[in-house]
Image (cartoon, rainbow, N blue to C red):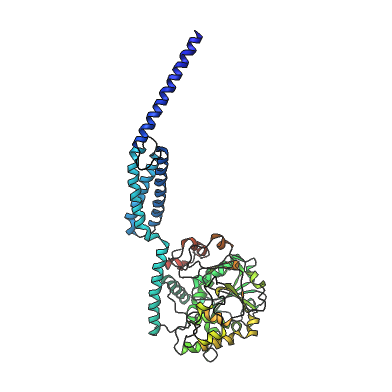
């Protein structure tokens, strides 16, 4: 009896296995019959491909939706389309299975096709290269307007006549209003300057700018990165009309951690006059292309006679590492240390000077490597020894008609003045391009002592690259009430 029971159980198990195999074979046949005839792929591989396409397009549209939310109300319908289609694709992806692939494949492909159409239509709004091209066109148009204004004699201050964004202009005006309303609360410069301003044992920086917000970021970032902030002194030189605005800002927001700031105007240097400076003489004679504030850097030894070494910083930089080491860089008797910018045949002297002029051909090599402003170490003792200011005056007089280089650009004047007197600065001190290059390696930015937003996409403008802007805005004192009043998008 026991043997018969075991035999019966074995027969039932064998029968069940046979039925299962038949069912699986039938299911496999049905699934293969519902597939497309254009490819021999199995249902599972086709299912995986459809699911992957759906998820990929859902992610793309979700990203576009996040960007579209930031646009104006006119983009509301586009945002709704992005969200709706993305939700449909996500839902379909979660419902896909072997049993439903034949029924849902057509519906899924339809939504993917619509997603592609939406993404294609929206690409221009989010494409970085398109933004760069439009910005270049705008900059060119503004430059042409500015040139016409110069020729019409509308710009007569002698200061660099760049276009000032409305927010920066508003900030300067608000600070000036605060100065007028509370004149007694804003201290003037003391009759006797603090000894730190002339102590050559300290670390001295010079910044030429009329942008109070940008300067505040340079000072704050450098002070916070310093190991000994109280040994760092910042000499800020601006146009007389902006000096009160700078005083209001730094009286309300002193430099952090005990760093020192000296605020100066062009009028604080009586030696700067038309009889001593060909730059001033050309400006007084009507040459509006010469930006005086930029050209003041060629008078550093005369402006700061007690100092032996200074670091010149542009106002569009952020300091990320202690710069005290720049005072230990061996210049080897040279006057200037700067980042060289030549690579291959680009950014050499031939790009910046007019080598069709015999005076240029005789004195300079077109293949010589150019360098950049932004972070420059100047040995003022070597400067005085080499008589670089006198050399600068000779070159400016030779270029009075603008035939040797564009007088609106200060770099060619520096390349010629310090020709043969510049030492390359290690690249880790200065990383450039955050105002025009969206593809700088993150590791290079992180390792840099100074990052430089040179280019048109300044970090205080709406067109700044989002991946870089936070590196600048984290040093902005957002508690300053004037920033809110002037609609800074920080």
Q: Is residue 58 above or below residue 173?
A: above
Q: Is residue 361 left or right of residue 118?
A: right
Tell me which residue sits at (42%, 38%) in the image. 44
Any part of residue 113 in sight? yes
Res 253 seen here: no
Q: Quadrant of residue 323?
A: bottom right
Using the image as rendered, state which of residue 91 and residue 211 is in the foreground: 91
Depth check: 303 or 191 in front? 303
Q: Quadrant of residue 155?
A: bottom left
Q: From the viewer's side, name the closer residue of 88 and 10.
A: 10
> Which image quadrant is residue 135 in?
bottom left
| 339 left or right, relative to 459 | right
Q: Looking at the picture, does residue 479 appear above or below residue 61?
A: below
- Location of residue 21 in the rendering, given as x and y in whole percent from the top left corner: 42, 26
Q: Is residue 36 above or below residue 176?
A: above
How many numbered discs?
0
The location of residue 490, given as percent across then percent down, is 46, 63
Residue located farthest toward the top when viewing the structure as drawn: 1
On the rendered structure, is 81 left or right of 455? Answer: left
Residue shown at 39% from the left, 71% from the top: 138
Task: Name the spot of residue 130 as percent of width and height, x first.
Answer: 39, 64
Question: Most extreme residue toward the bottom, as rendered?
Answer: 275
State the image coordinates of residue 422 (x, y, percent, origin top left): 61, 77
């Amino acid at each position: 009896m026991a043997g018969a029971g075991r035999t019966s159980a074995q027969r039932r198990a064998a029968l069940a296995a046979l039925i299962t195999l038949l069912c699986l074979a039938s299911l496999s046949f049905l699934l293969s019959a519902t597939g497309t005839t254009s490819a021999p792929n199995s249902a599972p591989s086709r299912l995986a491909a459809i699911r992957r396409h759906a998820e990929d397009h859902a992610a793309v549209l979700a990203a576009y939706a996040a960007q579209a939310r930031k646009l104006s109300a006119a983009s509301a319908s586009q945002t709704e389309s992005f969200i709706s289609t993305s939700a449909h694709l996500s839902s379909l992806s979660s419902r896909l299975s072997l049993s439903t692939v034949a029924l849902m494949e057509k519906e899924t492909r339809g939504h993917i096709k619509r997603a592609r159409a939406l993404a294609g239509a929206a690409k221009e709004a989010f494409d970085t290269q398109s933004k760069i091209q439009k910005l270049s066109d705008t900059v060119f148009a503004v430059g042409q307007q500015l040139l016409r204004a110069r020729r019409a004699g509308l710009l007569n201050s002698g200061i660099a006549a760049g276009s000032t964004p409305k927010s920066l202009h508003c900030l300067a005006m608000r600070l000036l209003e605060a100065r007028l309303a509370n004149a007694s609360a804003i201290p003037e410069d003391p009759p006797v300057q603090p000894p730190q301003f002339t102590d050559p044992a300290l670390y001295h920086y010079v910044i030429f700018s009329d942008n109070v917000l940008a300067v505040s970021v340079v000072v704050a970032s450098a002070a916070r990165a310093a190991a000994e902030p109280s040994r760092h002194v910042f000499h800020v030189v601006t146009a007389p009309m902006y000096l009160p605005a700078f005083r209001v800002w730094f009286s309300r927001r002193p430099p952090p951690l005990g760093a020192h700031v000296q605020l100066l105007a062009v009028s604080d240097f009586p030696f700067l006059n038309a009889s001593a400076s060909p730059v001033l003489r050309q400006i007084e004679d009507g040459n509006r292309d010469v930006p005086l504030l930029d050209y003041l850097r060629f008078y550093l030894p005369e402006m700061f006679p007690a100092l032996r070494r200074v670091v010149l910083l542009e106002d569009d930089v952020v300091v990320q590492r202690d710069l005290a080491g720049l005072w230990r860089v061996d210049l080897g008797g040279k006057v200037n240390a700067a980042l060289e910018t030549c690579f291959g045949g680009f950014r050499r002297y031939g790009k910046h000077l007019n080598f069709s002029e015999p005076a240029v051909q005789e004195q300079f090599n077109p293949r010589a490597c150019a360098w950049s402003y932004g972070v420059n170490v100047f040995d003022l003792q070597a400067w005085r020894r080499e008589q670089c200011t006198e050399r600068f005056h000779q070159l400016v007089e030779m270029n009075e008609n603008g035939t040797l280089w564009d007088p609106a650009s200060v770099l060619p004047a520096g390349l010629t003045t310090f020709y043969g007197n510049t030492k390359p600065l290690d690249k880790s001190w200065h990383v450039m391009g955050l105002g025009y290059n969206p593809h700088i390696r993150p590791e290079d930015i992180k390792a840099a002592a100074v990052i430089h937003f040179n280019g048109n996409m300044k970090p205080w403008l709406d067109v700044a690259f989002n991946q870089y802007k936070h590196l600048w805005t984290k040093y902005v004192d957002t508690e300053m009430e004037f920033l809110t009043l002037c609609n800074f998008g920080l």
